[in-house]
Image: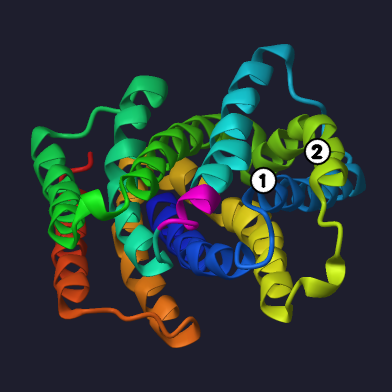
């Protein structure tokens, strides 16, 4: 199997795992405070990542890598989880999932700025078309209905795109699972004390669904998904493989409808299909 094919396969698996993040977060914030959910998921994943680093006796990253790891931590360990958890207090997971269609454009832009990639001009046309479909849907839904939720989701997309591109670039040197593990460990001295400080006073009111949501975002969204995703981006290219995120709303909407029984209208489906069609064109002109 060539490196490019392996990159797309790894990226697809990572995208599938991430598709369950927002529905799981939606369930978790029904009983958990968004801040607690953010720091708890990071702490759990960091302890698992630390154990992996110790078991495999990985070398410590160089001092020159610390700033990149800090950017990854602020983008995908703290920024995206916190902002999406806060946003899901205002909007449904089905509505927020469509904003994920903006992630490929955000990732590609930071892939150019931080990774030095240079996609062909036609790539940007398809990537922007997919993003315009998402923005148009948000306006059609009535963005003024919850400006706070939509602005939080937009902010989450920006910091996540930066964290994806930075982590993918560093993965070419350190390895995919090593990057997310070191980023988590770097954040642990802050995340663990905060977890203990903001933990719920009454654990008895926490439902089973919220516990399952916390478990999913801690194990899969915060750690396992990144092992595949960063490897895929590093192998196949940040801008190219990043377009797989255009498929994420489709899988996320299916999960929202089947697991959370949220309404998924025809407008959501049509926008998702339009966005998915853009990935073929973007993939063709990514290099």
Disc number placed over residue 90 in the picture, else none: none
- The residue under the point 51% across, 60% down is 14
Query: Does the residue at mark 2 contact the one at mark 1 (Cβ under 8 Å)?
Result: yes
Vertical order, 262 against 181 (above or below):
below
Q: Which segment did they paint magenta? A: 84-90
Q: SS for tag 2?
A: helix
- Among the two numbered marks 2 and 1 on one chain, the one whose residue lies closer to the N terminus: 1
Residue 135: % across, % down:
18, 49
Q: Which residue is mark 2?
A: 194
Q: Secondary structure at mark 1?
A: helix
Q: Residue at x 35, y 54 (%)?
A: 100
Task: Name the mark on residue 35.
Answer: 1
Nearest the camera: 61 or 137?
137
Rendering coords of residue 77 (x, y %): 63, 41
The one nearer the camera, 136 or 235, is 136
Q: Is residue 269 magenta?
A: no
Where residue 164 appears, as percent x and y from the top left, is 48, 39
Packing grade of label 1 (10 A; few <14, some 14-19, many >=20) is some
Quadrant holding the N terminus: bottom left
Q: Could you tell me how far apart the alpha carbons at marks 2 and 1 are, in whole angstroms? A: 9 Å
Name the residue at the top extreme.
64
Whether 87 is among the magenta residues is yes
Q: Label 2: few (<14), some or many (≥20) within 10 Å?
A: some
Please report the residue visible at 21 percent of the width from the left and 64 percent of the height from the top: 276
């Amino acid at each position: 199997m060539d490196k490019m094919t392996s990159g797309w396969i790894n990226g697809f698996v990572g995208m599938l795992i991430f598709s369950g993040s927002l529905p799981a977060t939606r369930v978790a914030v029904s009983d958990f405070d968004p801040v607690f959910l953010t720091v708890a998921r990071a702490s759990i994943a960091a302890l698992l990542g630390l154990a992996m680093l110790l078991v495999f006796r990985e070398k410590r990253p160089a001092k020159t890598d610390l700033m990149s790891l800090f950017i990854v931590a602020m983008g995908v360990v703290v920024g995206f989880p916190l902002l999406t958890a806060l946003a899901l207090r205002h909007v449904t997971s089905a509505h927020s999932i469509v904003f994920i269609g903006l992630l490929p454009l955000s990732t590609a832009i930071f892939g150019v700025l931080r990774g030095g990639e240079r996609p062909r001009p036609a790539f940007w046309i398809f990537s922007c078309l997919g993003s315009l479909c998402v923005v148009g849907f948000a306006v059609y839904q009535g963005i003024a209905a919850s400006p706070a939720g939509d602005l939080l989701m937009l902010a989450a997309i920006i910091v996540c795109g930066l964290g994806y591109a930075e982590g993918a670039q560093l993965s070419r040197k350190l390895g995919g699972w090593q990057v997310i593990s070191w980023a988590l460990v770097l954040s642990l001295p802050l995340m663990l004390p905060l977890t203990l400080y903001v933990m719920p006073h009454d654990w008895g009111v926490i439902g089973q669904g919220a516990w399952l949501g916390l478990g999913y975002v801690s194990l899969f969204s915060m750690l396992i998904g990144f092992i595949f995703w960063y490897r895929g981006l590093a192998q196949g290219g940040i801008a190219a493989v990043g377009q797989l995120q255009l498929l994420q709303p489709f899988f996320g909407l299916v999960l929202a409808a089947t697991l959370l029984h949220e309404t998924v209208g025809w407008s959501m489906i049509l926008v998702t299909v339009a966005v998915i069609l853009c990935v073929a064109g973007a993939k063709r002109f990514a290099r």
